[in-house]
Amino acid sequence: MLGTRAVDRRTRIGKALQAWRNELISDLGGIENLSAAKLALIDSAVKTKLILDSIEVWMLKQQSLVSGKTRGAIPVVLHRNSLVGTLKGLLETVGLERRARRIPSLTEVYAKPPGAPPAASPAAPSTESKP
């Protein structure tokens, strides 16, 4: 998802981001219903959320978000708003409406050979390594 250099999935933040990614995938009907392109957009949304959350934490610790010189918002406020727009666009592209997971018919279930592995679950961590 985030690459080994970005966020360690064993940390609290890494686990929270992975959980949010899994929720997005589940809301969109499961990983089996998503194209590689939509998964890439979901991963971009997760990274954008990480950056956005970090900026917001920093902003909330500041005494003021207004510049004394210009009497306007400090630049980070504008960057934060830009990231909100980016995240909104990514989420709109992958879909905002919850989709039901497709349930196989009895014919499909009985057509499966005995002992065949179940479909992939979005909660299972990816074994792929991305550069």
Image (cartoon, rainbow, N blue to C red):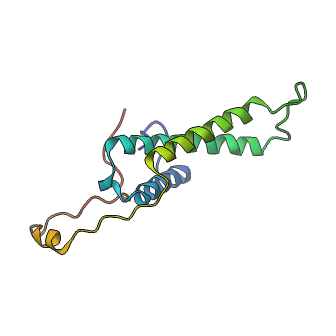
Asked whether, in this view, residue 119 is left or right of residue 12, the answer is left
Question: Residue at coordinates 18% horizontally, 75% vertically from top-left?
Answer: 106
Q: Position of residue 34 (x, y in %)?
A: 34, 50
| Residue 48 location, quadrant | top right
| Residue 98 location, quadrant | bottom left
Question: Residue at coordinates 30% horizontally, 64% vertically from top-left?
Answer: 102
Where's the C terminus, which quadrant? top left
Q: Position of residue 95 (x, y in %)?
A: 46, 51
Question: Residue at coordinates 17% horizontally, 71% vertically from top-left?
Answer: 109
Q: Position of residue 33 (x, y in %)?
A: 31, 54
Q: Residue furthest top?
A: 69
Asked whether, in this view, residue 66 is left or right of residue 19, the answer is right
Q: Is residue 90 above or below residue 112?
A: above
Question: Residue at coordinates 23% horizontally, 68% vertically from top-left?
Answer: 104
Where's the N terminus, which quadrant? top left
Q: Position of residue 114 (x, y in %)?
A: 10, 70
Total number of numbered labels?
0
Asked whether, in this view, residue 115 is left or right of residue 52, the answer is left
Q: Pick the residue in front: 86 or 53.
A: 86
Q: Is residue 2 above or below residue 31?
A: above
